[in-house]
């Protein structure tokens, strides 16, 4: 079981969790694919905005007119603490629980993030089967009790009054539409 009561900062009197995935036994793999005219410098900025400890490649191929490039950047065991703090400060914790757990199979999950949003320090989860302009950052997580960890990482005080769990009646619809409830 993961504890989520260790405040590291306060946004509007809401304690933030101090989780980073690594110290909790979560296996983390982060991948992004550069294709065509993707600017490696902008992709690097997006990666660093969400995952400042992501190691950038030392040799980067710049795209040139008439010569498309395909590169894959990936790293494992990268702390995701800043990403989790952004979920809290942007107040998108229920959306994050739904999006991060959408592809949950036993103790593993995979989700995508918009690089275009990341470049300005925002977290956005693309709809399933959609590739947003600017590409995606793909995050793979696995751990024993991963569902408990996801609940701890996305916990907020509102869940004291309106409990949430993955795939409950308050989950967003598959097409990204919000559930309405009273």
Image: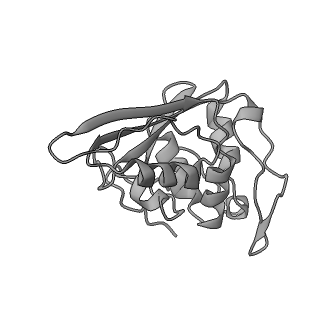
Return the x and y of residue 160 as percentages of the image width and height: 73, 60
Q: Which one is in front, 121 or 42?
A: 42
62 versus 134 height, above or below: above
Q: Which one is in front, 100 or 56?
A: 56
Return the x and y of residue 39 as percentages of the image width and height: 35, 51
Q: Which one is in front, 62 or 27?
A: 62
User: Left or right of 47: which side holds 64?
Assistant: left
Q: Which one is in front, 152 or 19?
A: 19
Q: Which residue appears at 64% of the width and 30% of the height?
A: 77
From where the camera sits, is residue 114 visible? no
Q: Which residue appears at 40% of the width and 58% of the height?
A: 116
Q: Which residue appears at 33% of the width and 45% of the height?
A: 128
User: Left or right of 81: which side holds 168?
Assistant: left
From where the camera sits, is residue 36 visible? yes
72 versus 134 height, above or below: above
Return the x and y of residue 91 as percentages of the image width and height: 60, 66
Q: In which quarter of the image is residue 33?
A: top left
User: Left or right of 152: which side holds 3?
Assistant: right
Residue farthest toward the bottom in the current orientation of the protein: 12
Q: In which quarter of the image is the N terminus?
A: top right
Q: Which residue appears at 31% of the width and 49% of the height?
A: 38
Return the x and y of residue 71 as percentages of the image width and height: 35, 34
Residue farthest toward the left in the current orientation of the protein: 66
What scheme was used to colour the molecule? one colour
């Amino acid at each position: 079981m993961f504890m989520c009561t260790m405040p590291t900062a306060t946004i509007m009197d809401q304690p933030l969790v101090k989780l980073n995935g690594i110290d909790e036994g979560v296996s983390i793999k982060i991948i992004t694919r550069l294709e065509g005219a993707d600017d490696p410098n902008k992709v690097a900025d997006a990666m660093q905005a969400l995952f400042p400890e992501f190691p950038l490649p030392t040799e980067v191929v710049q795209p040139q007119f008439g010569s498309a490039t395909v590169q894959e950047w990936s790293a494992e065991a990268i702390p995701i603490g800043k990403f989790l703090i952004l979920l809290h400060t942007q107040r998108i914790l229920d959306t994050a629980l739904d999006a991060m757990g959408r592809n949950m199979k036993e103790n593993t999950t995979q989700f995508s993030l918009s690089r275009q949003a990341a470049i300005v320090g925002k977290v956005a989860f693309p709809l399933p089967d959609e590739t947003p302009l600017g590409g995606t950052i793909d995050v793979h997580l696995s751990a024993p009790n991963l569902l408990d960890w996801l609940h701890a990482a996305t916990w907020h005080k509102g869940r004291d009054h309106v409990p949430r769990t993955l795939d409950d009646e308050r989950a967003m619809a598959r097409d990204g539409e919000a559930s309405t409830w009273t």
